[in-house]
Image (cartoon, rainbow, N blue to C red):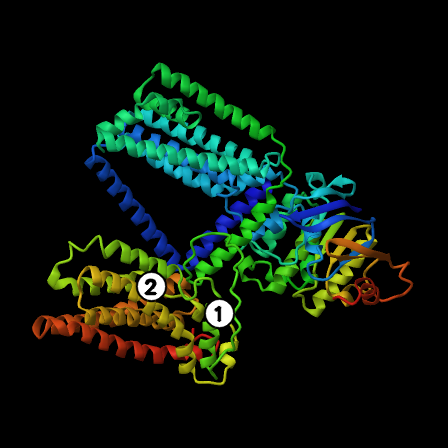
Amino acid sequence: MKALFYLAKRSFVNHIKMALKKPLTLIIFVFGVAYAIFIIMALASFASMIRLDSVQGLVIIMTVWSIYITLADFMTYSGRKGILFRPAHTHFVFTAPISPKLVLINSAWMNYIFAFGMWLLMAIAAATIFQAALWQAVLFFLAACILSLGFEIAVMVLLYANDSIPEKVLRGICWGIRVFLVALTLVIILYFRQNGLTIESAISFVDWPVLQMLPVVGWQVALYRLILLGPTVLNVVCSLLYLATVAAAAAGAVCMRCDGGYYEEAAKFADDYAELRKRQKSGELVSGIGRKKKTFRKIRERIGGKGAKAVFYRQLLEYKKEKYFIFSKTTLIAVFVALVVSFPMRDEVEAGYSRFFLLGIVAYVSLIMSGYTGKWENELKTPYLFLIPDTAFRKLWYSTLMEHIKALADGTIICVASGIFWRVQPLYIVLCILIYTVLQANKLYARVLAQCLVGDVFGAKGQDIIRAVIQMAILGMGIGAAVIVGVFVNVDLIFPILLIYSIIVTGAMCLLASLRFDTMEQLV
Amino acid sequence: MLEVQNLRKSYGHNVAVDGVNFLVPDGQIGVLLGPNGAGKSTIIKSIAGLLRYQGIIRIQGIPARRVEAKKLFGYVPEIPAMFEALTVREHIEYIRRAYGSDITDEEVEEMLTAFEMDDKQDKLGNELSKGMMQKVSICCALAVKPKVILLDEPMVGLDPAAIRKLKEVVLRLRDQGVTVLISTHMLEMVEELWDIMFVMKKGNIIGSYTRKDAQGKDLDELFFEMTGGED
């Protein structure tokens, strides 16, 4: 255990030292803290606004928390997930003469810090927002921090590190919890449909005695009720049952035999997580950990084109082999946007201005989405592209051409669906599709320029900030000019001006960005 | 001594290792050879305690999963993975504490110098090249002062000087009575090291030779005789 403490201590100290060397990390940290404070204040005023600022309100929150979060934790641990392992753990920790249970408990330190911080905030909120007495807030903190955290650790050891529970049983537990949570959610929805969504109906729902009788999670709720609302026969009995459960779980975890069988899943998780981090760092949109091995369609086709053009045809062949061709997560986002804004907003969009609403949606989606990180970025990571005997501009164009086609497809999904429901003239729908495609191309080239300008000095986040600054500054001028012409000359000129201006600046940026395709070495 | 008895490991319906038995006695160097997909890595990971398996693995007579066995066991994986926020020296310090090793500061210094890492002691894990990581990984395994050491493709990524040094270290460990098991594809690298060799194919050990039984034959000659020309 001393070795694990040493590992945690030195890693923490060195991380702080590294952070101090990188001003950007500190800036992000300060902004993160400020944002967290803002969210907390907003939640506090929201709680007052919906009349949740009483101990009854806290009981409602804790009831929902206990049922959903506690059970979700159980589900995570029974699926042998929820704890971050790194490949270095596989190399240096799993093979070391340290009890596998201690390794597991130690590895979940981030969960403890998060839980401690959260319960501390909740206790402060109990005393300040939810009008609990100081002793109640202190007791609430102790119950949550010591008992519920202790119970969570015990459950983690019992489920995650248990070599004697067969895999099928663990999966069964996972499914059982899932079914229970879905059933409970349905009950809650039906209840509020019948009784209306008011604070009074919520209080009478959480006062339902059956909730406190639910094994473990209900008993946990009973303990919070005992502390915050005072004793009743039911909450005293259920609290005692909870204490007994925590003690039994802790004893079970201590006595349980563990040979480290879970290292197999933990090592796989560590590799998957390292892969996920790598992909996130390269700016990819990653939604899940541990992807299944990709399967490809069999395509028999020759790669056409010569010089840099061969890059495009190679990418085309690769996409043909993919299950969904060029359609990806960004296509799903486009479909989602189309579904959310087209039909549902048809009455809100004013008839005469529908084309401007569409333009607004197109601009918003282009600016908020992280951009297309398809195969073009991978081209830059290998030396093969730079060895092709062709000009840098043609290399850039043919490496990114497929991304423009993808953007055109996504833009079509958003604009056609919205345009039809909002009755936008076909000409403006086409212009919006083109503007979307050019804006995405602009974002792509701005990204390459940002890479050229800052290299790895500020990391992927820094590059993204620089990219956003470049793009907003350049496009902002065009938007400003288009609006002025639209207001003072003719409102219909906004679309062609915006399109032509975007094409010109994007073309210029494309020329500049082609420098990145000249040599593998970056400018910075 | 390293004993593997009736080791069996499957991934779903795919049997990776099918009832493998072998033994490397004290003070001997065993080499585990075989084509890609033969099951070498599965055996190595099972011995290192990173996989669930059926069968028995013993280190100095103690079941390999026991903490007492792990104290005697050093491991150099094929792909080293460092803690990115730990320096080279801190990695070794961690090992010293985790294993309760009695290695002295002078010995650590000597070991780092031998692998030309003495001037990189304060470098963080994320600042090291692949070759340097491999050297740190070897130094960490040696810092355990093991009775049994397992080296999985240890020469990959090392420069010629480090390969020569590693060979010297392996021979010295053997002279000190340490059991060494090396898994590798690079037959010529272990030619002058091995005492006992095991050749794997499709999850089974298809043959083994001691150096005495080999009657002066080269390792690759023996290997290709057994595998029928597969590399």
Query: Which corner quadrant holds the C terminus of chain A?
Result: bottom left
Q: Secondary structure at mark 1?
A: helix
Q: Chain of mark 1?
A: A
Q: Residue at left 47%, top 37%?
A: A175
B125 to B218, vertically: above or below: above
B102 lies above or below A420: above
Query: Residue A373, position in %: x, y?
Result: 41, 65
Going by the numbered disc 1, the residue's amino acid type is Glu
Query: In the rendered image, is residue A132 in sight?
Result: no
- Coordinates of residue B9 in the picture (x, y in percent): 69, 47
For the residue carrying disc 2, how many other residues have a C-alpha within 10 Å: few (<14), some (14-19), or many (20+)?
A: some
Whether labels 1 and 2 belong to a single chain: the reply is yes
For badge 2, the amino acid type reads: Ile
Quadrant the N terminus of chain A occupies: top right
Residue farthest along the top direction in this orientation = A233
Q: Give the distance between the C-alpha atoms of the residues marked 1 and 2, in whole angstroms.
A: 31 Å
Q: Position of residue B91 (x, y in %)?
A: 60, 52
Q: Quadrant of residue B231?
A: bottom right
Crowd band around label 1 with a 10 angstrom C-alpha radius: few (<14), some (14–19), many (20+)? some
Q: Is A407 situated above or below A190?
A: below
Q: Quadrant of residue B107?
A: bottom right
In this rendered view, identify the residue nearer to me: A350 or B80: A350
The answer to which of B150 and B214 lies nearer the viewer is B214
Q: How many marks?
A: 2
Q: Earlier in the sequence, mark 1 or mark 2?
A: 1
Disc number for residue A318: 1
Given this view, does label 1 or label 2 mark the residue nearer the observer? 1
Residue A232 appears in the rendering: yes
Percent of width and height locating residue B14: 65, 51
- For disc 2, the marked residue is A465
